[in-house]
Amino acid sequence: MAAAGPEIERLIGLLAKLPGLGPRSARRAGLALLKKREQLLLPLAQALGDAADRVKVCQACGSLDTTDPCAICADPERDRSLICVVEEVGALWAMERAGAYRGRYHVLGGLLSALDGVGPDALKIGGLVDRARDAGVREVILALPATVDGQTTSHYLADRLAGADVAVSMLARGLPVGGDLDWLDDGTIAQAVRARRPA
Ligand SMILES: [Zn+2]
């Protein structure tokens, strides 16, 4: 791709490192930015600079915010007896969008994975165990993905939390809202049957 100058190549090369963007879509995105200088390129450059200057990791829960502790940890209206464990900040955002949870969070920073060589030391597990022992914490909710690594991590965390005086729960697996049985995979239907409850 020597048709463009080094600044453009650098821009596209960096865009291509973003999740979900391969070289081809990075070229399209880069071109769109360069063509829309006022509407896109300059505001994006400003937003990137602001984020780089101001966003930090919350030392309590591992979330990202412009304050440390983050707005959720600092919110006195949040139920301090609940800690919801998520894999990454994106999952925390999804939980917040759902609006069904009013406790605090703990971002693990990944999942245990024998295949990828991710052991307990690579994740924020010690901090979770410490927080679970805090006075006033009643329940730790494991909101990890329904994958092999997610399950492995949940079981490991349940073991590690056994010494703390807290209830440990997992999110239910089952039918999605609006889900038609005909369209669901066997694993989801089997989970839903096992997790059935009185009507
Ligand atoms: Zn926080």
Image: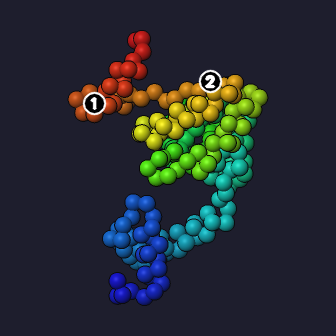
Q: Is residue 159 above or below residue 148?
A: above
Q: Which residue is mark 1?
A: 186
Task: Please tell me whether mark 1 sits on a helix, a strand or a loop.
Answer: helix
Beta carbon at label 1 within 8 Å of ligand 1: no
Q: Quadrant of residue 105?
A: top right
Residue 177, position as x, y percentages in the image: 37, 30
Q: Quadrant of the C terminus?
A: top left
Q: Quadrant of residue 133?
A: top right
What mark, if any, has residue 167 been given in the picture?
Answer: 2
What mark, if any, has residue 47 been given in the picture?
Answer: none
Residues 14 and 186: in front is 186
Say which amino acid is labelled 1.
Asp
Say which amino acid is labelled 2.
Ala
Q: Is residue 53 left or right of residue 18?
A: right
Task: Please tell me whether mark 2 sits on a helix, a strand or a loop.
Answer: strand
The residue carrying pointer 1 sits among few (fewer than 14), some (14 to 19) or many (20 or more) residues within 10 Å by Cα, namely few
Beta carbon at label 2 within 8 Å of ligand 1: no
